[in-house]
Image (cartoon, helix red, strand yellow):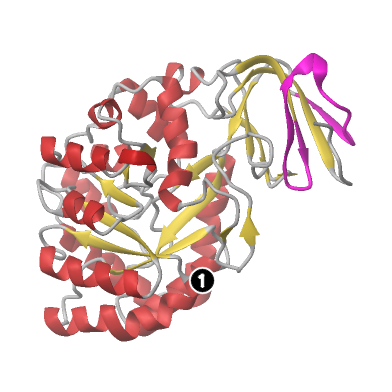
């Protein structure tokens, strides 16, 4: 297929090209970006002409990271909580209240500036697609402004009014608020609803009500589940057809079986999104990503960037951790951090709609027709992401065919 269009870029002399297509990574490869999508990919010697040529000089090219779980609209930080945790205090969901107070006190401009800073930081690390959640306002007005601010800067916004019950609120009255006026207010600005189904947050009955309300509103569903211990999160996610269950640190055989069966007979089931940086920061057991993949469950890797339990935008760090400590291969980890995240967000198909109302090509792959989201590593292969952990390897980034780093 030849490159057609007024703006085309040939990235040539690629040492290793990972497309997440049916073929293995291609050596001595090239890729053409045109009109915001991938127009061609294959051996370097067969590459068509383009308006501009970029010499990869033997370095690796792979899809931009798809970070499918973040909390980027917030004020303040929780350094003291982190220090206490490192000194041996256990993590509990109640620490979220500290960020809620700081977020409510921040101006719109301050929240937007912090969000833009983190988005830009993520892009410099190779991230080209970002989801973020509300959940640090926990009033109708504050959740609405978080959704509006996020919708201007990220690819997907998830409503997480069901993060925790605010300290000053009656639990039953707050649940009514989340499932009614708060959901109604944010619905035009979000694509999904999430619930923190965990001790100290929302129990099974409350989680059911929230998921039912989200489904009735026509929104996608996600579940924070099985983070702090065994619980009903996975089971509820599968029962309600949620796109993903996130954290998934404490799973039994029934949980694995339920997730695997959700994909039977070609159905679109529930992705397990693992958050290794959060597991490390909270000193919880690493999620069983190896067992999930072995059971046939699609896995996504995300940063969970937030000020309390995982204050990092580095998908490369999450990938390296997945390889070094969760026993994934480099190829499995890269796929989970790109295509896996896209599947978890429903963005692996053409025509998904961003928060600004624009239909988008699929992301997470570099197959022909996918959005041209590309990262170039300053290394000859993706293996260096785990072989050289902690080293910033992202050399250049294109998003929708435009170079942004």
Q: Which residues are magenta?
A: 32-55
| Residue 64 visible, this orientation | yes
- Residue drawn 46% across and 31% down? 335
Instruction: Confirm whether the magenta stretch covers residue 39.
Output: yes
| Residue 321 percent coordinates (x, y) | 34, 28
Residue 128: which quarter of the image?
Answer: top right
Q: Is residue 177 above or below residue 384?
A: below
Residue at the image position 33 percent from the left and 47 percent from the top: 269
104 or 357, which is in the foreground? 357
Image quarter hosting the C terminus: top right
Horizontal arrangement in the rendering, residue 64 relative to residue 275 (left or right): right
From this view, report whether residue 287 is shown above or below residue 402: above
Closer-to-camera residue (307/63): 63
Query: Residue 13: x percent and y percent?
Result: 75, 18
Using residue 283 as the reference point, say whether residue 330 is left or right of it: right
Q: Is residue 78 above or below residue 169?
A: above
- Which residue is at 61% across, 15% downward? 380
Count the marks: how many? 1
- Percent across and percent down for residue 305 are 38, 50
- Residue at 34% in and 23% down: 328
Q: Position of residue 195 (x, y in %)?
A: 26, 63
User: Splitting the image into 4 quarters, where does residue 367 fall?
Assistant: top right
For the N terminus, the image quarter is top right
Helix, strand, or loop for circle 1?
helix
Can you see residue 107? no
- Dot 1, crowdedness within 10 Å: few (<14), some or many (≥20)? many
Residue 308 or residue 227, whichever sits in front: 227
107 part of magenta stretch: no
Which residue carries the number 1 mark?
149
The quadrant in which residue 395 appears is top right
- In the image, 110: left or right of 305? right
């Amino acid at each position: 297929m030849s490159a057609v269009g007024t703006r085309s870029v040939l990235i040539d002399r690629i040492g290793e090209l990972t497309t997440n297509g049916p073929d293995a990574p291609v050596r001595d490869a090239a890729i053409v970006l045109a009109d915001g999508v991938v127009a061609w990919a294959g051996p370097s010697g067969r590459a068509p002409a383009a308006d501009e040529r970029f010499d990869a000089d033997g370095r690796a090219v792979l899809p931009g990271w798809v970070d499918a779980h973040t909390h980027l609209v917030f004020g303040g930080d929780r350094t003291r909580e982190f220090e206490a945790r490192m000194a041996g205090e256990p993590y509990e969901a109640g620490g979220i209240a500290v960020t809620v107070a700081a977020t409510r006190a921040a101006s719109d401009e301050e929240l937007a500036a912090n969000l833009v800073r983190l988005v830009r930081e993520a892009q410099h690390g190779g991230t080209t697609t970002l989801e973020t959640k509300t959940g640090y306002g926990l009033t109708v007005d504050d959740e609405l402004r978080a959704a509006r601010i996020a919708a201007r800067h990220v690819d997907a916004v998830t409503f997480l009014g069901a993060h925790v019950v605010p300290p000053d609120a009656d639990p039953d009255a707050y649940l009514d608020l989340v499932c009614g006026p708060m959901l109604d207010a944010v619905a035009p600005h979000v694509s999904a609803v999430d619930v923190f189904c965990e001790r100290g947050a929302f129990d099974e009955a409350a989680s059911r009500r929230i998921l039912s309300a989200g489904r009735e509103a026509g929104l996608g569903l996600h579940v924070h589940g099985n983070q702090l211990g065994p619980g009903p999160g996975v089971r509820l996610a599968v029962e309600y057809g949620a796109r993903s269950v996130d954290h998934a640190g404490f799973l039994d055989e029934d949980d694995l079986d339920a997730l695997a069966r959700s994909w039977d007979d070609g159905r679109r089931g529930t992705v397990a999104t693992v958050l290794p940086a959060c597991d490390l920061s909270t000193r919880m057991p690493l999620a069983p990503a190896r067992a999930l993949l072995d059971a046939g469950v699609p896995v996504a890797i995300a940063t969970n960037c937030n000020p309390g339990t995982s204050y990092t935008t580095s998908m490369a760090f999450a990938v390296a951790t997945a390889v070094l400590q969760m026993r994934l291969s480099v190829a499995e980890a890269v796929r989970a951090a790109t295509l896996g995240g896209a599947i978890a967000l429903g963005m692996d198909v053409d025509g998904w709609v961003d928060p600004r109302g624009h239909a988008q090509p699929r992301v997470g792959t570099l197959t022909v027709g996918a959005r041209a989201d590309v990262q170039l590593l300053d290394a000859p292969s993706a293996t260096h992401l785990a072989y050289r952990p902690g080293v910033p390897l992202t050399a250049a980034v294109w998003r929708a065919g435009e170079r942004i780093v």
